[in-house]
Amino acid sequence: MTGDIRIRADKLTKRFGDFVAVNAVSFEAGRGEIMGFLGPNGAGKSTTIRILCGLLRPSSGRAEVAGLDVAREPEKVRANIGYMSQKFSLYDDLSVMENLSFFGGVYGVKGARLKRRIAFAVEMAGLAGREDAVVSDLSGGWKQRLALGCAVLHEPKILFLDEPTSGVDPASRRRFWDLIYALAGDGVTVVITTHYMDEAEYCNRIALINGGRLVALGSPSELKRSAIRGEILLVEGDDPGAMLEALEGAPGVRDVAPFGSSLHIVVDDAARDRAAIEARLAERSLSWSRIEPIKATLEDVFVQLVGEGGKAAP
Amino acid sequence: MMLRRVRAVAQKEIIQILRDPRSLMVVLLMPLMQMALLGYGVNLDIKHVPACVFDREGSQQSQSLLKAFQASQYFSVVESERTYADVTRAIDAGRCKIAIVVPHDFSETLANANAASVQAILDATDDNTANIALGYAQAVIGAASGNIQLERAQAMGQPPPVVPAVAEYRVWYNEDLVSRNYIMPGVVALVMALVGAQLTSLTISREWERGTMEVLVSTPVTSLELMAGKILPYFVIGLIDAAFCLMIAVFWFQAPFRGSISTLFFTTSLFLVVVLGLGYFISASIKSQVGASQIALVATLLPTTLLSGFAFPIEQMPAPIQWLTYLVPARYYFSILKSIFLKGSGIADLAAPIAALALYAAVVGLLAARAFKKTLG
């Protein structure tokens, strides 16, 4: 292992029959880094994570996790990683403590260390006083934090979280991210998949995945800078559909995309092109309530690179 | 193999078993019910075969012959007929399985020709019962004709006829030729095969169905550790079930038990490892609980009833089917139980079937460990 590189994927490819789920994905992730996998459903995020956890063999390419080849030494890899699957995967009929003891056991943690780690997990998940509660009686946020607690009992160097926050209320999501930051602060490398754009902003680096390919890789601000060549104008009005039609292909307009009830328009120079847009809308007798330059969001990047329907960008 | 991990899996499995009392009851009561059903239901002894008689002569001699049938515990004479048509009707209607017809010249032929024949008409829709009934009828008539010879010799003032050689037989091991003595070991083997495979058939498929396997495979637990941890608790339950079944066989159905408990314990443990491993193998190969449970049922029930030698003697099967029986683990356990129960055999006497079971356990264990792949896909 060179330096602090914890994950190294090199042209990682996974085929299921004719379908290429993961197509030549290469990246590296370092110690304490929070790496987000962002992409539409079926893009290959979960498959990539499963390969890195040693749960699927890559069809070609190679990957090292904690300096170990995932295809050749999956058992050793597993001792170094924690994994939270998309679906809740703890034992519903067991209590909080029984789940923790079981996972501590299968991770090979024992004695005083196990006690200390279980105490840490209970504290972290905010489950003090609920150690004997049966898991099926817990709410979503608690279950999710307990799952995270189980995944870090053996102090893994790398944590893989596959859409851990889906179906959890916003307050719990916020709290969950605090835990992720704390773990990353302790040096744990965290790989997390999500389709929440706001969550993607919390990541140190984002790997944008679409159609099995790594479309873009970089910090949120890097992605915004490189993907959006130009500036963004927000347009709000009574008839966004007609405005979209009017502005598509209009002079100075590089791209138009609907965002809720408003439009995001990519232009070269917001100050210069604003007048042209207003003129165009007036020409079609469309009224607008607001036109103003905004900062690009990751959603703009996503739309720019992946396209509305999740189609691959050219 | 790390014992810490095996223990963690076994503990978790025990908690889950105890937390589901209904399943636990099923697991403990099912063998009891099967023992009762099979113990009472399977009975190869045939007694009181319904019979009708048609005496065409009505002489003292014909009547005394028919009395012998009435006196026999193998037959119960349900009616006397007056015509052949009545005989046909009685058999057609199923009121009797056998009809004994004494010819109109029975005593005359007996007096003149020294040998008279009696006709037996049998309903052979169930050929096994018919064969046995025919055998009984021949025995009854044979005894009756011996008596006639003796009476005739006495009447003529002659010494009793000398029979040059008489076969004297002793039945060993099952002195009373009671089929239940031989059936009970078979019933125990059958019930244990069914229950054993059922016990483990759900353990892996349940984890797949509930989604818990997803994280379990990402932990460092090896497939061998998982198998050991999961089979261990069910081995204990299997032993409890076996103890129930064997006690019912001995104390309730009064099957004679002449062997030692330690031989019984050792061989039963070995058989349990085989059937639990088989259930685990099925569970690991099939990811749905219903599917795994049904395949475990078919995989144990059919071969055990048909090919273990319990219902059909192996020596009478065609050679290719006989070879097939070597693949049925219950075949060995059945022969072991029969020997322990009826002959009191020890481990040394049972070396061959024990070796076969041990080999079987090793192969099933290997297959089961390989069937469970720690991958998703």
Image (cartoon, coloured by chain):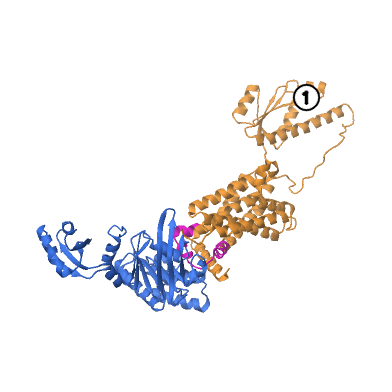
Placement of A216 over or under B104, stated as above or below: below
Q: Colour of chain B?
A: orange
Is B227 part of what is drawn in magenta?
A: yes
- Element type where label 1 sits in the image: loop
Q: Which quadrant of the figure has residue A44?
A: bottom left
Is A287 part of what is drawn in magenta?
A: no
Q: Is residue B147 visible?
A: yes
The prevailing secondary structure element of the residues shown in magenta is helix
Q: Which quadrant of the figure has residue A266?
A: bottom left
Crowding at mark 1 (Cα within 10 Å: few <14, some 14-19, many 20+): some
**Which residue has dot 1 on it?**
B116
Instruction: Tell me which residue sits at (72%, 54%) in the image.
Output: B352
Residue sitting nearer the eye, B348 or A299: A299
From which residue to which does the magenta span run? B205-231
Instruction: Tell me which residue sits at (38%, 78%) in the image.
Output: A185
Instruction: Check the residue under mark 1 and report the chain it is in.
Output: B
Q: Colour of chain A?
A: blue
Q: Position of residue B230 (x, y in %)?
A: 55, 62
Q: Position of residue B315 (x, y in %)?
A: 70, 43
The residue type indicated by label 1 comes to: Ala
Residue sitting nearer the eye, A247 or B135: A247
**For residue A233, side relative to residue A81 (left or right):** left
Q: Is residue B253 visible?
A: no
Placement of A35 over or under A251, stated as above or below: below
> In the current view of this chain or complex, which residue is farthest to the right?
B158
Q: Which quadrant of the figure has residue B144?
A: top right
Placement of A2 over or under B199, stated as above or below: below
Q: Position of residue A10 (x, y in %)?
A: 43, 66
